[in-house]
Amino acid sequence: MKLRTLIGWGIVIYAVLYLVWTGLVVHGFSGMIVSRVIVLATLATVTAIATRALRVTSEREVIPYAIGWICVAIIMDAIFAVPSSG
């Protein structure tokens, strides 16, 4: 497992989702079911791109990266989202 790839794609996934969610909030779509579908579709698309970039041979090789991406998202939320939301 490459640490640089894990952290890099984790930050990219978080940044894209944060940007999409912020755009939905700014335009007043955050309380709708459509916004959840858009965020979920964005998450699926970005993680699919990240997974293909890993060039793994089996699905089991992706699991450590997925867990790492979740950890990166938790850390990024603690750094960016929690202080601004209280």
Image: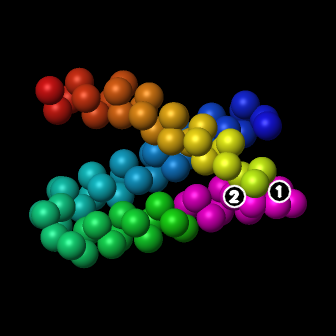
Where residue 42 appears, as percent x and y from the top left, is 45, 65
Residue assigned mark 1: 56
Mark 1 residue type = Val
Q: Which quarter of the figure is the C terminus placed in?
A: top left
Residue assigned mark 2: 51
> Quick check: 57 left or right of 31?
right
The magenta stretch is 46-59
Q: Are marks 1 and 2 in contact (CB under 8 Å)?
A: yes
> Quick check: 18 left or right of 70?
left
Q: At 45% across and 53% down in the image, what residue appears?
A: 16
Task: Please identify the residue farthest to the front as the structure is shown.
Answer: 60
Q: At 58% across and 42% down in the image, what residue appears?
A: 67
Where residue 56 appears, as percent x and y from the top left, is 83, 56
**The residue tagged with tag 1: helix, strand or loop?**
loop
Q: Crowdedness of circle 1 by 10 Å Cα count: few (<14), some, many (20+)?
A: few
Where residue 10 appears, as percent x and y from the top left, is 57, 42
